Every structure is written in C-alpha cells, then in structure tokens.
C-alpha cells in the first residue's frame, strides 16, 4: 500500500503546496474527539441538501423555525444539483458543511472518516427507523430524513378500464394485466424511463418481496443470482418479459422522466416501478392536468410469498454531522430537530424516521391492501462484499447500464435472449464473486 | 531585479497556471493509472501495468474505440461541408455575412442545449419524422441508426468551427493572386484547386488532427442524448462510467492516458505524412 500523499516528487517547488491541497484532503487529522457534541447551541451552520426544489421555500422556513426556537443560531441551506458527484468531490477536499446527506459513494468502513458517530445502533433503534443504513461496527453515522416503500406506482383508472381492480399477485398475472391494458385502452401499459436510466434501478429495490430478512447478507454468497426462482431472475426477468412482449414504450431512447409524470397522471401510461416517494409527484402532476389525483396508487411488486405481498421500506438519504464541522453542538441539535420536530417527513408523505410518528396516507393505503412492510437490515458478516463484487464484475446492480442492455436485448436491438444474457450475468457475477469472497 | 530574471517574472503567472491546471493533473493521472484506487480511500494499491493490460485485452474496453469510427467518418463530411461553404462565402455572394452567421451559430450553442434540441428532433413523431413522413426508423432507438444520428448531430454542431477556420485562412490569401489567375484565364474551379486548397493546406491538416482527436474523445452529445445506452458508448463515456460509476479511478486514468497517447501518436504520424512546410503561393 502506498499513501497517495507521498506523491509530491513531481512538479516545481512552487506547486507543491497546491498538490498537497488538492490531493491530500481525505482522512486528515480529526478535529475533536469522536461523537463529542458538547458546547453551546449557537452560531451558524451550513447544511448541504439535494433538494434544489425546496431550498428557497420549505427548507428556508425550517431554517427560520429552528433559529426561532434556538436563539443565536442561523442555518444556511446549500442546494447541490449533482449531489452524489459534487459532494463526493467535496468530501475528499475536506470542506463539506456542518450537516449533510451522506453520499451513497461513501462505503461503510469509510463513514467514520468523514462523519461523527451519533450513538450505537442498539440505543438509537429504540427511537428511530432505518438506523442501520449508515452504521458501521455498531455506530450510527446518519439519521434518515424519512423512508419510502418500494412498489409500483399505477393509475388505477386505466387498470380498472382493462378490468383489473386488485393488484396482480404473480408476474404472469401482471403481464396479462398489461396485455389487457394494451388491448382495451390506448395506454402504454408500462413505462421504463430507459433514457433517464435511474428508474430502471428500482428493479434492484425489490428484495423485500421474498420476505427473507437476511437477504442482503446472503446475497454475496450466491454465485448465480440470475437463476430461476432467485431475486434477480424474478425482478430483471419481469422487466425482460414486459419489454419482450411489447408492453412498454415504443422508443425507449427518447423517454423523459419529467413528461412521464403527467403521462401516468392522465392515464397515457398505466404503471411504473418506483416507490411511495413518487406518488406525491404523480398526484401533483394530476392536479396540474386537472384530473383526479386519487387514481394514483402504490401497488406491490407482483409476487407473493406464502400468500402475502411484502414490500421493502428503506430510508432516504441519511443526514450526518460532518467530522470537519467547527460547530458540532449546533449541527447535532439541528439534525435532531429536523428529524423529530420539523415535520419534514410528513410534508413529503414519507415514512417518518421517528417511530412515534404516524404513517402517511399513501403507506396506510398500501398496508390496508394487505402488504407487509419490511425493513431489510444491511449485510453484516458480508458487509461491503456486494459492492466489491459489483465493482469487480462491472454489473451495476444498483444502476442502469446492464439493465439498459437487458431492455435492448428484450426489444431485439442487441444480440442474445433472456437465457443467454442471464447466463452471461451469472458467469461474470460468479467469477467476480469468487475473487472477492475467496 | 536583473535583466535575466525579469522575463521569468512575466512568464510566471502563465507558467503557474499551466503547471497547476495541466501538468500536475496529468502527472496525477499517470500516477493513478498504475494503481487501484476508488477515489476516496487514503491509500492506493499499486498494480503496475495491470490497468493498461486490462484496457487492451478486455473486449469491453477496446471495443468502444470502434464507435469512434462513426464520428471519424462524419468528420470527413464535416470538413467537406465546411470547405464547400468557406469557398463559396469567400467569393462575393449575396447575404454572405448572414450565411456566415447561420453556419457558425450552432457552434456557439451550449452542448447540453444541442443535445436536448436533437433529442426532440429525433423523437418518434418528432421534427425529423414530420419532415420525412412515411416510414422512418427510430433514430436513436434502432441500434443500427443511433450512432449515425449522434455523429450527424456532432457534424451539425462543429461544422461552424471548421468553417470559420477555413474562411479565415482563405481570406488571408492576397487578392492579387486571384486577379493574376483570372488574367491567365483560370476559372473558379481552377482557383479553388490551385490557389485556395494549397493556400490553406496547413489549416486543412490541422482540421484532420482535430477531427481525429475529436472523434476519439466524443462525449458530450452521446452522453446527453443516450447516456451511452443502445451501443453508443464512446471511449470517454466508458472511462467516465469506469471512474464515477464503478469508482475505478486507476483503470479510468489508464484509459485517459491511452487516449492521450493515441492522439499524440496520430498527430505525429500526420505531421510526418504532411510536413509543416511554409506555404508560398508566389
């Protein structure tokens, strides 16, 4: 192993300081002891957020409210458009605000390098949901700002027009339903949002359907997840079948996420695999288009285990206190206030992080339809292995590149078929797995 | 202050900027390319030439070079179109300034805007389909057509730049030479063939270098329009995905170094084939 800060030999003497400044940020000296939030709650803090749409409205009001409750404090929200990429870069630079959302690119073992531990998992789990999502070795580094349930966002009216009023229970039933929509209504049965890409990654968020709580830990142990009956076969296989049977949009390359919202709201398309977070956005689109927002509903992924639907719930971005913050007391106070008292989760129709708060209506309806909500603990014994296999095999399980290829194959735009592609994925995954798991 | 030091003093700002923002990053990149690093870890693992071996042996990596051929072929069309218009508009043509503006305008547009405009242009039932009517392919959805569509967009965008380069060069040819040629009985074609083309040879060869490096490093337009999906991944998109999707900074740096070396090599070959001699028209 070579410390990259030793790379100072090249370049003129005048530029040495600059090199060190540019490349030597990450993992520098700790400021203060870990997890120490003592001190007065006053002064100003900077909060990084990905919500460019809310920064000047809702979030600014929260900032005002917090200052009113804690005189002598000011909260500055800073919206970052390309949150993942930009903040990851800022992390290695060392200047990343006082409170921020933990970018997903930070692997668990690296959490302690950038963020203050907030308490132990055992202790915080009594009060909060999703505590283990950003935890490492029993320490929690971030609190989720609200959670979501995974599932299909549908336009119930289009489904009813095709004669289907209850959520399909099997992939076959779902495909038959889409077929009926294609024949009886003018709607595009399923919209993949292939061009924007990230909606395809929702197919990776359906692990709850198997009702297997340790699935994340077991996943890296499986050398061929694309075998019939296994999770990737179920989810990616459904995507393949939808596209292969011509039940999705005609030209996937020109899809557009923003315009897909009014399409679903007005019944031009019937279903998209997203999650509860998308329901308020679709309902807003329905209101804009002057159609009833009540037609938009969340349905479970069409698969039942032991006669019951199961859906995974996960926390959205987790907020954390920056290790480099100069005002940790205020930062921690704000984080606690934001999660417990601001009402942010309720306003977003998200599953509240605090266990004591009630579920939003969309989730209540979802549960009333007979769906069991399931929070899947992250891998523990095999922690981080899945990411390593993803990197090694370059099958971006949580992304869209290999799923776009899957759609291309399914619509006949690339060579192969379902069996050959799944065999190839199994082979690549298995080879990478044997390197990572040893 | 001695007389010997003062030139360096004047050069310093430029040199510091150049070293800080060009040579140091390139040095860093070369250093990264010999390591396995995820961009965040404080330590990097040296892997020797491993990354380079991978770039050249893994089909997934070298195959993307083939996509550049579409853009390279398109750049010939681009040079031809630009030369044609530059020649025509260098003679006295009606509304020539207006046409110059129209031809140069696409180059001034933001690449992101161009991407979005053409996204609508290529949509099923979009502008192009309306213009052509009847049976049209899916311009971006059909894998056999998609790269031509993207390369075409690229031609539309960059023809203006090549055009301006040619026009400037043509206008630097002294007017007396044309007069003399006319007296000798040369028609317009003869003037193009024997005066203009030899006169701007250096600019044409520069355009080819730009075309080659441009087609190898095509990124903006395919990235915005297709994100590299449907078999349109170019070398730079692949490097981008490797670096920021799979966080293999070392491997991606190796790809970037390979790209740099190829461009240098092509430039060198090109300079050997077309030596940089002084052009004399007299």
Image (cartoon, rainbow, N blue to C red):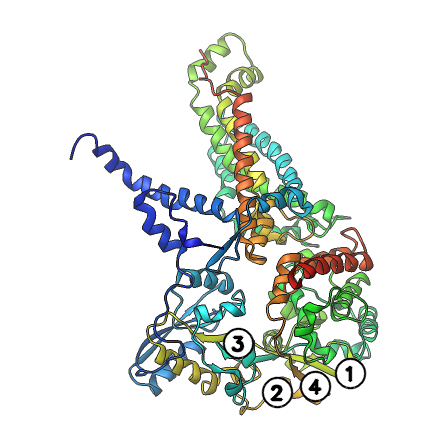
Instruction: Please identify, in this view, whether the residue under mark 3 or under mark 1 is nearer the observer.
Output: 3
Q: Give the x, y percent position of residue B131.
A: 68, 47
Residue where numbered disc 1 is placed: A166
The numbered mark 2 sits on a residue in which chain? Answer: A
Mark 4 → mark 1, Cα distance in angstroms: 16 Å
Q: Give the x, y percent position of residue B81.
A: 58, 32
The numbered mark 4 sits on a residue in which chain? Answer: A
Whether marks 4 and 1 lie on the same chain: yes
The numbered mark 3 sits on a residue in which chain? Answer: A
Circle 2 sits in a helix, a strand or a loop, which is it?
A: helix
Residue where numbered disc 3 is placed: A137
Q: Give the x, y percent position of residue A259.
A: 62, 65
Mark 2 → mark 1, Cα distance in angstroms: 18 Å
Mark 3 → mark 1, Cα distance in angstroms: 43 Å
Residue where numbered disc 2 is placed: A361
Please, is residue A258 above or below residue A413 in the view?
below
Instruction: Please identify, in this view, whether the residue under mark 4 or under mark 1 is nearer the observer.
Output: 4
Instruction: Please identify, in this view, whether the residue under mark 3 or under mark 2 is nearer the observer.
Output: 3
**Image position of A426 (left or right of A341):** right
Residue where numbered disc 4 is placed: A372
**Image position of A345 (left or right of A199):** left
- Circle 3 residues within 10 Å: few <14, some 14–19, many ≥20: few
**Image position of A426 (left or right of B235):** right
- Circle 1 residues within 10 Å: few <14, some 14–19, many ≥20: few
Mark 4 → mark 3, Cα distance in angstroms: 29 Å
Q: Earlier in the sequence, mark 4 or mark 3?
A: 3
Circle 4 sits in a helix, a strand or a loop, which is it?
A: strand
Q: For this rendering, which residue is in front, A107 or A81?
A: A107
* Residue pictured at 74% horizontal, 59% vertical: A425
* Residue pictured at 78% horizontal, 51% vertical: A415
């Amino acid at each position: 192993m070579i410390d990259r800060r030793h790379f100072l030999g090249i370049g003129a003497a005048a530029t040495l300081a600059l090199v060190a400044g540019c490349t030597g940020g990450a993992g520098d000296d700790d400021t203060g002891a870990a997890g120490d939030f003592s001190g007065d709650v006053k002064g100003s803090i900077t909060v990084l957020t990905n919500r460019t749409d809310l920064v000047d409205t809702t979030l600014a009001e929260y900032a005002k409210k917090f200052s009113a409750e804690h005189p002598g404090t000011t909260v500055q929200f800073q919206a970052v458009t390309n949150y993942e990429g930009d903040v990851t870069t800022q992390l290695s630079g060392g200047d990343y605000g006082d409170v921020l959302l933990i970018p997903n690119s930070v692997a668990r073992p690296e959490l302690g390098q950038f963020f203050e531990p907030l308490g132990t998992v055992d202790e915080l789990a009594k009060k909060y949901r999703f505590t283990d999502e950003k935890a490492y070795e029993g320490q929690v580094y971030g609190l989720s700002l609200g959670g979501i349930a995974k599932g299909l966002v549908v336009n119930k009216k289009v489904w009813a027009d095709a004669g289907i009023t209850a959520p399909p229970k099997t992939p076959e039933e779902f495909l038959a339903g889409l077929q009926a929509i294609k024949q009886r209504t003018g709607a595009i049965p399923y919209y993949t949002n292939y061009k924007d890409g990230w909606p395809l990654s929702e197919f990776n968020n359906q692990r709850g359907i198997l009702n297997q709580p340790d699935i994340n830990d077991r996943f890296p142990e499986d050398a061929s997840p694309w075998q019939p009956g296994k999770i990737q076969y179920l989810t990616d296989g459904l995507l393949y079948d939808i596209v292969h049977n011509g039940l999705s949009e005609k030209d996937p390359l020109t899809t557009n996420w923003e315009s897909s919202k009014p399409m679903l709201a007005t019944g031009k398309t019937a279903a998209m695999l997203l999650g509860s977070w998308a329901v308020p956005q679709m309902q807003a689109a329905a209101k804009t288009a002057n159609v009833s927002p009540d037609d938009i509903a969340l349905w479970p992924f069409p698969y039942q285990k032991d006669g019951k639907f199961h859906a995974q719930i996960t926390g959205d971005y987790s907020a954390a206190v920056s290790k480099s913050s100069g005002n940790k007391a205020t930062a921690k106070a704000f984080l606690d206030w934001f999660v417990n008292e601001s009402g942010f989760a309720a306003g977003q129709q998200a599953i509240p992080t605090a266990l004591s708060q009630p579920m939003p209506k969309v989730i209540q309806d979802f549960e009333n339809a007979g769906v069991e909500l399931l929070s899947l603990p992250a891998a523990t014994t095999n922690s981080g292995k899945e990411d390593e296999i993803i990197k090694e095999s370059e099958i971006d399980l949580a992304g869209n590149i290999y799923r776009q290829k899957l759609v291309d194959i399914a619509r006949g735009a690339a060579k192969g078929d379902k069996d050959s592609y799944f065999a190839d994925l199994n082979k690549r995954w298995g080879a990478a797995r044997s390197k990572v798991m040893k | 202050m001695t007389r010997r030091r003062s030139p360096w003093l004047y050069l310093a700002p430029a040199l510091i900027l150049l070293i800080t923002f060009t040579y140091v990053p390139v040095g860093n990149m070369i250093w990264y390319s010999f390591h396995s690093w995820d961009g965040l870890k404080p330590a990097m693992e040296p892997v020797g030439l491993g990354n380079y071996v991978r770039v050249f042996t893994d089909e997934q990596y070298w195959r993307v070079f083939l996509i550049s051929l579409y853009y390279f072929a398109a750049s010939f069309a681009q040079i031809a179109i630009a030369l044609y218009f530059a020649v025509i508009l260098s003679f006295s043509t009606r509304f020539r300034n207006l046409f110059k503006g129209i031809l140069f305008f696409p180059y001034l547009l933001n690449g992101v805007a161009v991407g979005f405009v053409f996204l609508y242009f290529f949509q099923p039932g979009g502008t192009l389909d309306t213009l052509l009517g009847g049976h049209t392919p899916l311009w971006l959805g059909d894998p056999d057509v998609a790269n031509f569509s993207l390369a075409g967009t690229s031609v539309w965008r960059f023809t203006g730049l090549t055009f301006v380069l040619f026009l400037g060069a043509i206008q630097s040819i002294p007017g007396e030479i044309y007069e003399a040629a006319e007296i000798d009985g040369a028609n317009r074609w003869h003037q193009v063939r024997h005066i203009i083309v030899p006169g701007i040879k250096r600019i044409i060869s520069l355009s080819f270098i730009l075309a080659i490096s441009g087609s190898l490093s095509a990124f903006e337009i395919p990235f915005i329009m297709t994100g590299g999906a449907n078999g349109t991944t170019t070398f730079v998109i692949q490097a981008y995905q490797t670096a920021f999707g799979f966080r293999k900074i070392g491997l991606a740096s190796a790809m970037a170094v390979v790209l740099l070396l190829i461009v240098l090599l092509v430039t060198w070959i090109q300079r050997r084939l077309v030596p940089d001699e002084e052009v004399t028209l007299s």
